[in-house]
Amino acid sequence: DYYIDDKGIKPTDFLNLNIEELKGGMSGALVEKRNNKVYKTDKSTSDAVAWYRIASKYFNTPKVESVIGNTMCMEFITHSGEPNVFKAVEILKKVKKIRVAKVSFDTYQNRIAEHLKINTMLEADEKESIKLILKKWEDAFNAESSFSHGDFSIDNLLNHDGEIYLIDPIYII
């Protein structure tokens, strides 16, 4: 269902609105491209917005234009070609140096546990083994915590006119 405020969009614009669901993430969030904007609805929207506000000071991210409830609206970044590996490494170096409120490794462990629940390729004992390994290294990771993208994968690096933009953070402040 869509609620349309008469000042937000004209009826003709609404009729011509091109809505496309964007898939690929594993968060379960609803992500839609509506014309040239991306709308993401998720329970962790406030955390994502906080990440974008900090991250935009250090590297390229889509501009967050508005937040209403659990939905954020941001600019759509066109992606063409693969990101430059050297630029990606430079971003990783910047991420490691950014110091903000301490982030616990529990957040990552919980995310992996959620992924393991839906994974059908691993046996139960393999899943438990992964959890135990993560628990074993918890203190080491907590000692080295920094501002983290949390999902720094090639799918979350967009190449736009030769510049890399980061999207889809996993970050809890």
Image (cartoon, rainbow, N blue to C red):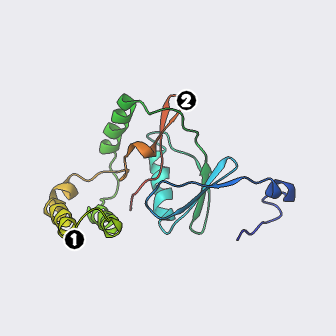
Q: Nearer the viewer, residue 138 or 121?
A: 121
Of callouts 1 and 2, the N-terminal one: 1
Residue 56, numbered label:
none
Q: Nearer the viewer, residue 51 or 31?
A: 31
Can you give x and y, in whole percent of width and height, for residue 150 in the image? 35, 53
Residue 65 in view here: no
Q: Which residue bears the numbered disc 1?
A: 124
Can you give x and y, in whole percent of width and height, for residue 115 in the image? 34, 64
Give the alpha-carbon distance from disc 1 to disc 2, as whole Å: 45 Å
Residue at 38% x, 50% y: name it.
149
Task: Kindly give the residue lying farthest to the left in the view shown.
Answer: 136
Crowdedness of circle 2 by 10 Å Cα count: few (<14), some, many (20+)? few
Q: Amino acid at mark 2?
A: Asp
Report helix, strand or loop for mark 2: loop
Report helix, strand or loop for mark 1: helix
Q: Amino acid at mark 1?
A: Ala
